[in-house]
Image (spheres, grey):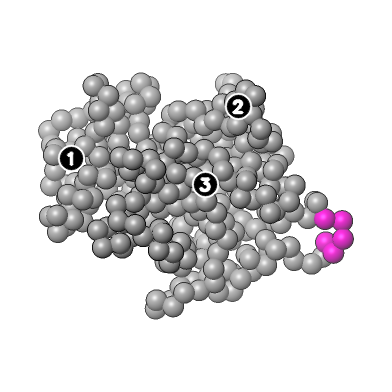
Amino acid sequence: MRLLQFLDSENKPRTGIVNGARIQLLASVNTVYELFHDAVRQGVSPEERAAQLAGNQYAEYEKLIQDKRLLLPLMHPDPYHTWVSGTGLTHLGSAASRNAMHEKMSKTNASELTDSMKIFKMGLENGKMQSGVPASQPEWFYKGNGLMAVPPGHDIPSPAFALDGGEEPEMVGLYIVDAQGNPQRIGFAVGNEFSDHKMERINYLYLAHSKLRHCSYGPEILLGNPPDSITGTTRIVRGNAVLWEKEFLTGEANMSHNLANLEHHHFKYSMFRQPGDVHIHFFGTSVLSFADGIETRDGDIFEIKAEGFGEPLRNRLSVQKG
């Protein structure tokens, strides 16, 4: 089941089940956040509760897109209680572009593994958590709170001081921490993690700076577990033409870490287990337009789609003035 959040004609949030071109609105709850807590009270899963609350009101999907009324598929009522984070070097082949980026800055010992490749190798050899035993710790980064998340169809701002602003097509895990402090996986969405790759290229210790950028995810949330293997397409549209396009693979079958291990190493920190908090966690990518020599410009449109996740995620790049 896939859900969509949007603003109705009175600018109030609503949630519905995606049924092709129509959205079947839920009764009694207005958001996925409310749906989760209502499902807990009823002792059922969010998917079961959504089916129970499916009403007789509908919205037209295309109209919502045209009117830019789509919302992020999961939000906390208070954006300061949303954590946006991610793990990198998690996909088979994802280290190649990162390693090439760093090796360009090194004039000696080019034959040795960079730190990026060492981390990737650790995950490749021991990245699958089994029987509750944690595996190798992945690269981890912080992107910001809920203020850094841009709804589908809206502009992604790039600050005036940024050196670059490039897409990162990824699978995103969406979580709510329950009243007992246990993180509950609600579902998954397509995401654009968006980073400053030129800044990172200067020195990999600038990774933390390069990740402090806006992002987007959605427009739909796929409840439950994702497919083991997911094929997607990412592209950049400039004007009326496709500037760049590439297929990407994600899902556990295409990752050096499994989701259980990535989730463990994020939620093992007690500050990430505060009741009621929302977590938006990006799981990494293996495809970057930057690695293919693309330099984005103000007005470029990022479009990311994946099988089983519904409509594409689209955002326009807006370079801020100094």
Q: Amino acid at mark 3?
A: Lys
Q: Nearer the viewer, residue 34 or 91?
A: 34
Identify which residue is drawn at 46% across, 74% down.
134
Q: Secondary structure at mark 2?
A: strand
The answer to whether one can see residue 186 in this image is no
Left or right of residue 164, residue 316 in this image? left
State yes or no: discs 2 and 3 in contact (Cβ < 8 Å). no
The residue identified by callout 2 is 319
Q: Amino acid at mark 1?
A: Val
State yes or no: discs 3 and 1 in contact (Cβ < 8 Å). no
- Up-down: is 322 above or below 251? above
Name the N-terminal-most of marks 2 and 1. 1
Q: Amino acid at mark 2?
A: Val
Identify which residue is drawn at 72% across, 47% down.
201
Name the N-terminal-most of marks 2 and 3. 3
Q: Nearer the viewer, residue 130 or 42?
A: 42
Which numbered dot is residue 29?
1
- Nearest to viewer (mark 2 / mark 3): 3
Left or right of residue 206, residue 229 in this image? left
Identify which residue is drawn at 46% across, 57% down.
251
Near mark 3 (Cα within 10 A), the count class, few <14, some 14-19 or many ≥20, is many
Q: Secondary structure at mark 3?
A: strand
Near mark 2 (Cα within 10 A), the count class, few <14, some 14-19 or many ≥20, is many
Near mark 1 (Cα within 10 A), the count class, few <14, some 14-19 or many ≥20, is some
| Spatial separation of the CA atoms under disc 3 and disc 1 | 29 Å
Magenta region: 106-110
Left or right of residue 5, residue 283 in this image? right
Left or right of residue 249, residue 118 in this image? right
The picture places residue 122, in percent across and down from the top left corner, at 61, 71
Q: Secondary structure at mark 1?
A: loop
The residue identified by callout 3 is 143
